Image: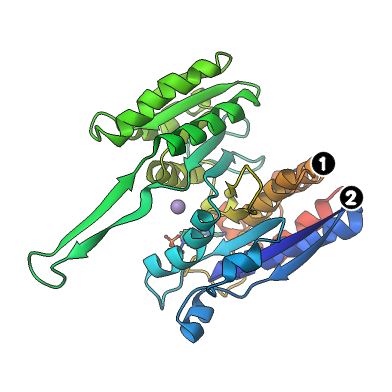
């Protein structure tokens, strides 16, 4: 039986609520299913740690995470600290420090869940957005000068490397190839941003030649928002830059019913560093501490983590349990139109696990 060491970083706000729910489900599955065993170590990094130590995680934090098989992450963000500090010092520190360059975001309408789009129901779209996760608009290059004077200037420089663009496009092409429809849509903004985005287009024209079995097309990011709303069934796998895919995947999450469902994997495909799994949503200041956060995004992330660890059967089992609960519709959290608490949804999913 395989044994996995999982580092849990619940972080801030509802991150702590949904990660403890997810850990409970994973531990139940290990105990009940006897397919694998896990040991979860929790790292109390985030806003409280920052207020005590002046940083979101310790200097040697990544060294501490290295021996783990996977990282299970909640959210970074707290009303007491500016968002760019919490994000950069914790989540981006880990993603970029471990070069987790492929951010994978599946979305579909789960059974029993209502999309805000009229005429869209379960099965009508099944997307995976692949987000470049190591450079681009979030490379952190830039600065501010003449601070506090009227001539103040601020610059954010997007960094696109040929190797970075090529590896994410190949990753997306491979993923598209592995799925039944074998379709990939490249998203850029190469009409307006005529350097990096045009290099994305040029690189894509070259690398897609190696995947003649994958059907490809291209969209500008603004037009893509329209297509996602008006013709969702036409899309399968989507690849885009760090910023564009960030925005598109929040839209995808909303179209699939709620941000509270959506999950994501920050993958280091080479496996020399751990990959990280997290719900897409943030700390949700408006509902934190109330015990009503939807834990499904966290459970779906746990399923992606199991799949990454090679436990496909357990991953499928967890998704099946989630879908059984949403299909039944009796234990829906508030964001899906019900009144069930985090605890109730967690228990319902545990009870729905088929052993
Ligand atoms: P958010 O995702 O925290 O919340 C947006 C809205 O969606 C809120 O109304 C919230 O109540 C609702 N929502 C989100 N998740 C939900 C869930 N599981 N169940 C029910 N409702 C849910 O986004 P925001 O308000 O833009 O950001 C709040 C904080 O979180 C900020 O500090 C931001 O920087 C941070 N954040 C962190 C991450 C991350 O660490 N990955 C991602 C996004 C935002
Ligand atoms: Mn986002």
For the residue pair 138 and 30, the one nearer the viewer reads as: 138
Q: Position of residue 290 (x, y in %)?
A: 58, 73
Quickly name the residue at label 2. Answer: 35
Residue 170 visible in this rendered orientation of the protein: yes
The residue sitting at the left extreme is: 150
For the residue pair 11 and 140, the one nearer the viewer reads as: 140
Name the residue: 43% across, 47% down.
246
State the mark number for residue 216: none
Q: Quadrant of residue 75?
A: bottom right
Where 269 sits versus 184, above or below? below
Q: Is 255 left, or right, of 348 in this rendering?
A: left
Name the residue: 62% across, 71% down.
291
Disc 1 element: helix
Q: Position of residue 14 (x, y in %)?
A: 56, 68
**Mark 2, residues whose alpha carbon is within 10 Å: few (<14), some, or many (≥20)?**
some
State the mark number for residue 313: 1
Mark pair 1, 2: CA separation = 9 Å
For the residue pair 322 and 211, the one nearer the viewer reads as: 211
Disc 1 C-beta below 8 A from ligand 1: no
Tally of marks: 2
Disc 2 C-beta below 8 A from ligand 1: no
Tag 1 near tag 2, CB within 8 Å: yes
The residue sitting at the bottom extreme is: 52
Disc 2 element: loop
**Mark 1, residues whose alpha carbon is within 10 Å: few (<14), some, or many (≥20)?**
few
Residue 223 visible in this rendered orientation of the protein: no
Name the residue: 54% across, 45% down.
257
In primary-sequence order, the first of circles 1 and 2 is: 2
């Amino acid at each position: 039986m395989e044994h996995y060491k999982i580092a849990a970083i619940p972080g801030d706000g509802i991150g702590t609520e949904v990660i403890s729910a997810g850990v409970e489900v994973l531990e139940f599955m290990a105990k009940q299913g006897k397919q694998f065993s896990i040991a979860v170590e929790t790292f109390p990094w985030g806003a409280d740690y920052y207020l005590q130590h002046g940083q979101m995680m310790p200097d040697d934090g990544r060294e501490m995470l290295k021996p783990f098989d996977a990282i299970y992450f909640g959210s970074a963000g707290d009303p007491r600290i500016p968002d760019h500090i919490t994000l950069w010092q914790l989540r981006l520190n880990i993603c970029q420090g471990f070069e987790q360059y492929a951010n994978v975001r599946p979305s579909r309408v789960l059974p029993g869940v209502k999309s805000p789009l009229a005429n869209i129901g379960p099965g009508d779209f099944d997307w995976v957005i692949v987000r470049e996760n190591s450079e681009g608009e979030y490379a952190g290059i830039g600065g501010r000068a003449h601070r506090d004077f009227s001539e103040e200037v601020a610059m954010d420089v997007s960094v696109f490397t040929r190797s970075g663009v090529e590896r994410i496009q190949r990753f997306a092409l491979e993923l598209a190839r592995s799925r039944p429809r074998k379709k990939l849509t490249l998203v850029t903004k190469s009409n307006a941003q005529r350097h990096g985005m045009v290099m994305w287009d040029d690189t894509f024209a070259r690398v897609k030649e190696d995947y003649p079995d994958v059907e490809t097309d291209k969209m500008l990011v603004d037009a893509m928002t329209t297509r996602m709303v008006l013709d969702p069934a036409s899309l399968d796998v989507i690849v885009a830059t760090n910023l564009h895919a960030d925005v598109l995947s929040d839209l995808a999450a909303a179209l699939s019913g709620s941000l509270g469902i959506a999950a994501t994997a920050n993958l280091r495909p080479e496996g020399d560093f751990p990959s990280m799994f997290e719900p897409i949503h943030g700390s949700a200041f408006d509902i934190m501490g109330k015990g009503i956060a939807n834990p499904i995004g966290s459970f779906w992330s746990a399923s992606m983590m199991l799949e990454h660890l090679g436990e496909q059967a357990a991953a499928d089992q967890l998704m099946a349990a989630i879908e059984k609960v949403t299909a039944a519709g009796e234990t829906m959290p508030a964001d899906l139109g019900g009144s069930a608490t985090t605890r109730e949804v967690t228990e319902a999913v545990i009870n729905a696990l088929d052993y």
